[in-house]
Amino acid sequence: MSAVVALLAAARSRLGGWLAAAGAVLAALLTAYAAGRRDGRSLSETERLARALRAREVRDAVERDLDRSGDADGELHRDWRRR
């Protein structure tokens, strides 16, 4: 009977070692996954901000061009009077 108990104790200690190793590997994988998600999220946010900045620059350029062009209605009226 004591031999069976000794075999079970040895199996339990080996199993505990394997479970601890598997748990450590799983923890490392989860940590890498979480870090990747965090990096991906920050990269996505950076790209979104860059697109928003570019859109703002284009919008400002269009508004500046429109301000420089003057009054379209006044130009048409003036051109019509000349003829």
Image (tube, rainbow, N blue to C red):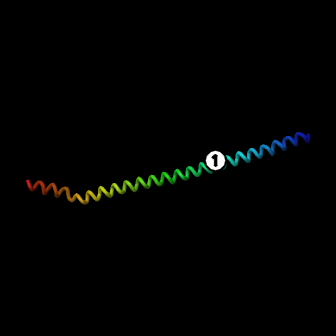
**In the rendered image of this protein, does residue 2 appear above or below residue 42?**
above
Count all numbered tags in the image, as a single digit: 1
The residue depicted at 55 percent of the width and 53 percent of the height is 38
Quadrant housing residue 13: top right
Q: Nearer the viewer, residue 74 or 10?
A: 10
> Horizontal placement of 2 versus 69: left or right?
right
Q: Nearer the viewer, residue 50 or 8?
A: 50
The residue depicted at 11 percent of the width and 54 percent of the height is 80
Q: Position of residue 67 (x, y in %)?
A: 25, 60
> Horizontal placement of 9 versus 21: left or right?
right
Quadrant of image for the N terminus:
top right
The residue depicted at 81 percent of the width and 44 percent of the height is 12
Q: Position of residue 26 (x, y in %)?
A: 67, 46
Q: Position of residue 30 (x, y in %)?
A: 63, 48
Q: Position of residue 71 (x, y in %)?
A: 20, 58
> Horizontal placement of 55 versus 33: left or right?
left
Number of residues whose C-alpha sits closer than 10 Å to that of mark 1, classed few (under 14), some (14–19) or many (20 or more) = few
Judging by the rendered image, the residue that carries numbered circle 1 is 29
> Amino acid under label 1?
Leu
